[in-house]
Amino acid sequence: MTALVEVTDLVRTFQVRPRRRGVVGALRDLVSGRSVEVAALSGVSLTVGAGEIVGYIGPNGAGKSTTIKCVTGILKPTSGTVRVCGLDPWKERSAHVRNIGVVFGQRTQLWWDLAVVEALDLLAAVFEVPPDLYRSRLGALQELLDLQPLLRTPVRELSLGQRVRCDLAAALLHAPRVVLLDEPTIGLDVAVKHKIRAFVRDLAARDGVAVLLTTHDLGDVESLCHRVVLVDRGAAVFEGTLDALRARLGGRRRLVVTTRGPIPAVARDQLAARLGVVVGELAPDRVEITFAAGQSASPIVAAALEVLGATVDDLSLAEPSIEEVVAAFYAEQRS
Amino acid sequence: MMRAQVWWACVRLGALHRFAYRMEVLSAVVSAAVVVFLNASVWNAVVDGRPGLAGLSPVEVSTYAVIAWIATIVSATRLDEILGARVRDGQIATDLIKPLDLHLWLILRDLGRAGASAALTAAPVLVLAASVFPFVWPSRVGSWLWVALSMVLATLIGGQLAFLIGLVAFRLKNVSGLAHFKASATAVLSGAVVPVQAMPDALRDVVVWLPFQGMSHTPAMLFLEQLDGAGVTRALGVQAAWVVGLFLACRWSWARAIDHLTVQGG
Amino acid sequence: MTRVITAWVAQRVKVRLAYRGDFVFQALGDAVITLVGLFLIATIFTHVPDVRGWDVHELLVCWGMAEACLGTFWVVFQGIYAINRTYILGGELDRLLLRPVDPFVQILLDNLHLEDVPVIGLGLVVLMIGAHGAGVVWGPAEIVMLPVMVVSGALVIGGLLTAVTALGFWVHHQGSAIGLAYQLTVYGRYPLDFLPRPLAILVSTAMPFTFAGFLPATWFLDRPEWHPYAAIQPLVGVTLMFAAHRFWTWSSHRYASTGT
């Protein structure tokens, strides 16, 4: 698999000017304002291959957007290299932007005061898409993203979900090989989210597009991403598959056992002693057995049935959610 | 006592706002110097080699051209745009529920702004212009006092005129065109562009009955010591009368505007 | 490129026509500023027959030329005013950097201000009236140079202000610097010998706004001593714009977008 996006040791710093308080402070700032250097990214590396969807996740201010902006060529890296389809986004901008499609969930790329179709026409002209190719692509996108009813609407009158769909179409008119999505599903309802996820999944699978996705919605990650990169305070702290992330953390699996009638405390203690696990009481007739993610559930189920016998009414097994995993991961990082 | 503190804080805020940014202070000085110098250049060229103009000697014409524009810089305000913007983005609703009188608040804030303008903009430009162009300083210390008092009144006139313009924003969507128009009209009618005594007769007859001349012509005449004792009193009296008249006009329009807002729901 | 620009301008015209009310209001507001200048000239010449040897007709030609240059500048370069607040501080530049067209050109195209076309007309009318009074004979040299000089004058102003907006990439909140540089354009309206020497030097060298008014105007007047300067005006305009654009692009490398 060829890597279409290659980021190596990316560093980006910003100048910040702290302000002093009050009249005297304002006067002093006037005379001697100093600026402080803050590192938003301190050495991030990542790759995205053709047909691959990589999730880029981290808390607010971790450096997600800065990374995306460096990959798009909006920001010049302070140091380190970025290569997209073999090009330096920053030095070879005009060739580079023809290779990428970008959607910012929080901000439209379209013109507020134009109707959607006019904005798309103009973008096709800007990207020099030949007219017949444009017509066929627009036709296909219109179908997939259900744009037909929106085309004549001015961009400013679109709802958020409609706008993101239009932005996706706009980003794909020139058939980019790399797609960068910055929080594409933020603030969307479940139905639209599902539609967009399906669309992105197809894009990678069918067209071999490389997708880099930042999101706070771990549902996006779980349903889309082949790999994840976790970033915290400007540095990548994990890279790998979701399963690897779960295993690495030793997230907890949970077996919940419900019985007919209350469970005696003796039985709970017996279970805990025998399995060497934690057994918690959820209700008089329900216990929760927590064990490591790497451990098989069969011996635990067997033990539970043996100890509690015929009173067992129901068994259910819960895998650690990605949210818990990520939360646990950051807790571990900070401690 | 508490109230006085609030109002003082308000004046202070207006002044503070004025020098929040280094570049803005510097550029205010330079941009004021630009217009003042242009006006002085043109009028100096006009009276060059001539005995005078409309009863003023060449040096007095030059001084008038400098002072009248500087006075406009201090007394002219963007309060109308500020008020217009508050109405447009709906912030006016939160202003109305605060235990503050918005009219007084804005006017006092503007007084602070004018004070900072006088110290940080007008004074340096005045010194610069006086060193470049023919210029005559007041001969009596008392004249400075009258000029200072006149400038306070000029600011109150400018501020309240702007407030009235801003109130139109309650009815009108786009106040910036009107503000533009007001700025140009003020420059002409106040005497900043053409000294009042050099204006065509028909225009001058109108101008003396308008508040605008209080914004720069009056301070310029006091600076040039063109008025005798009774003349000074009368000139300041006219300015003060306009301040009171405009104050009442503002209160009345403000009350009606609030009605309009609350009845129509903004 | 031509296809892009045509498509772009067509969209702007469409959008503008949708807001006809604002259109009229703006044009009126700008006309008032123009009238203030005319009022000043008219009043002056009720008192004196000439100012340092320049009569009212010659001043009207200068004034009309400056107005036409300024009007052209307003139409084409309106976007310059939005650069600092909207594009640099507001982060709108992000969007433009994702398209294969020069971002500066995109800013101009997105902000074309067709409302100010009447200002150009007004300037030309004043120029014609003055030229008529001054007895200007319209030969090929005059007819060809008029549009060239108007456009070049706009490039002089546009070039200088472009350089100033580029400073926004280096210092935050230089928003007023542009208004300040713009204000200097008023000096371009009057003959250089109206101005004190330092100012005359300033507006013919570092801030050469006299190339956007007085100097090109002399081309049409019987003032042969100024003609050599007038003749190089188009070159000055093009050179300034070119250099300023290079500086802008180079400075834009410091763009920091908005918060992370």
Image (spheres, grey):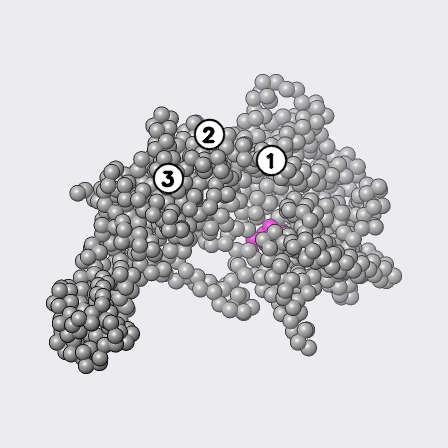
Query: Which quarter of the picture shows residue A128?
Result: top left
How far apart in space, not on screen, are marks 2 and 3 (Cα)? Answer: 25 Å
Q: Nearer the viewer, mark 2 or mark 1?
A: 2
Q: Is residue B30 magenta?
A: yes
Q: Position of residue B21 (x, y in %)?
A: 53, 59
Query: Which quarter of the picture shows residue B121?
Result: bottom right
Q: Is residue A236 magenta?
A: no
Q: Nearer the viewer, mark 1 or mark 3?
A: 3
Q: Chain of mark 2?
A: C
Q: Which residue is mark 3?
A: A145
Query: Which quarter of the picture shows residue A3?
Result: top left
Residue type at mark 2 is Ala
Looking at the rendered structure, which numbered label has been put on residue C7? 2
Q: Is A83 rendered above or below residue B259?
A: above
Label 1 residue SS: helix
From the image, which quarter does the C terminus of chain C lie in? bottom left
Residue type at mark 1 is Glu
> What residue appears at the point 52 percent right and 55 percent down from the top-left corner?
B23
How far apart in space, not on screen, are marks 2 and 1 (Cα)? Answer: 19 Å
Residue type at mark 3 is Leu
Tag 2 near tag 1, CB within 8 Å: no
